[in-house]
Image (spheres, rainbow, N blue to C red):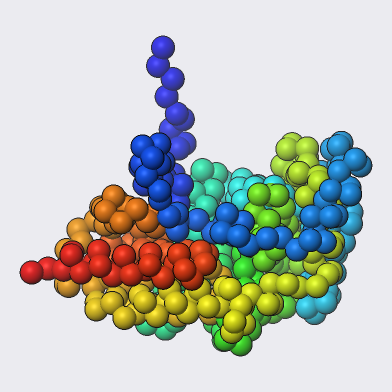
Amino acid sequence: MLIRKSNKLANICYEIRGPVLEEAMRMEDEGQRILKLNIGNPAPFGFEAPDEILVDVIKNLPTAQGYCESKGLFSARKAVMQKYQALGVKSADVNHVWMGNGVSELIVMAMQALLNDGDEILVPAPDYPLWTAAATLSGGYVKHYLCDEENGWQPDLQDIKSKISNKTKALVIINPNNPTGAVYSKETLQGLVALAEEHGLLLFSDEIYDKILYDGATHLPTSTLTEGRIPCITFGGLSKVYRTAGFRAGWMILTGPRTGVSDYIAGLDMLSSMRLCANVPAQHAVQTALGGYQSINELIVPGGRLYEQRKVAWETLNDIPGVTCHQPEGALYLFPKLDRKMYDIRNDIDIVLQFLKEEKVLIVQGTGFNWPTHDHVRFVFLPHVEELQPAMSRFANFLHRMRNK
Ligand code: PLP
């Protein structure tokens, strides 16, 4: 019997958990110890959820055994509504919040509800690759717009403009950005909103790292700029800011004018009810997480774990000849550029595989984030400095061996 995967999967790529990870797992099966810097999963590196979140989930377990309303628990949706209202988004309301099994599920839902075959959607390059995968799987055609490394990885508005056609339906923003760590300026965001408004595009703003900010960077929620102008769907969740990626708790909230989007909202409601509901125990944590003490703030300031780890990893990378790296203003990642004149790099997957085999550290190739050229890799800076520093130095040694003679 031959069972083949569907043709729909032919062009789908999700390399963060792709073939390179399979090789790492094979090596682990052989008894080798691999340091996995390939995925933004805080818990395995000793980042713990705030106690009050755990207590809330445990306390509510007895009443969380059944399905809840498809869109999510009222308490969770109300907390999400209040989060955005407190930021100044007056139009945030509880009926336009959908809870999901992480932002991941909601991205897939948002794409499935929107795209007909051949509809175009603008997604950043580099991107968090689920956006491209979900849009493609839904029959959409992804046009990647460039983020400009020379300009702190801010989206290139001219490039976006040049890629808008009469088939373009939506524009995706990831801010703070994975994989670049860029936090977008007010001017950039105003430009993005103006383009969406001018061309009638639905805006999707993935803000899952909205509170992971360094060196005084400020995050401006896109929804604060779209009020009274255009609809905007913002994505957020507990995975990163509250270090509970395994709970699978995320949300999306539609704000701004509703005119013209009621049919799309009906589509979202339909998909939401088809999957019955999101994980109920985790939804009990949302109100406590959003309304309580924001312990993430202790981790992102000098002396805090994330701050110090980012510093060490960035400094080590930037000291390597032929490596340049934008210092992230937000999120959990570094996306350095490797000078291909200096290093023998034909294919970025080969580099990542070779580094894995020789130094037992797993990272992800830049093309896995839909970056067009083979000259970037992504590091996660989640391990303690004592583990991270030697791993970064091993990358320096590895590149030294790769140097063109
Ligand atoms: N969006 C971005 C930009 C991410 O980096 C991630 C995870 O790494 C997600 C969404 C998905 O997060 P989750 O499904 O855990 O909420």
Residue found at x 38% / y 67%: 390
Q: Quadrant of residue 36?
A: bottom left
Q: Would residue 198 be found to the left or right of residue 338 on screen? A: right
Query: Which part of the image, by quadrant, shows the C terminus?
Result: bottom left
Residue found at x 65% / y 72%: 210
Residue found at x 89% / y 47%: 60
Q: Position of residue 339 (x, y in %)?
A: 23, 73
Residue found at x 38% / y 40%: 31
Query: Which part of the image, by quadrant, shows the N terminus?
Result: top left
For this rendering, which residue is in front, 268 or 264? Answer: 268
Q: Position of residue 245 (x, y in %)?
A: 64, 54
Q: Would residue 386 be found to the left or right of residue 324 on screen? A: right
- Number of dots carrying numbers: 0
View extreme (left): residue:
405
Q: Position of residue 211 (x, y in %)?
A: 67, 73
Asked if 187 appears above or below 212 in the picture, the reply is below
Q: Position of residue 294 (x, y in %)?
A: 76, 73
View extreme (right): residue:
63
The answer to whether residue 383 is visible is yes
The answer to whether residue 263 is visible is no
For this rendering, which residue is in front, 375 or 57? Answer: 57
Q: Would residue 249 be found to the left or right of residue 127 on screen? A: right
Q: Quadrant of residue 61?
A: top right
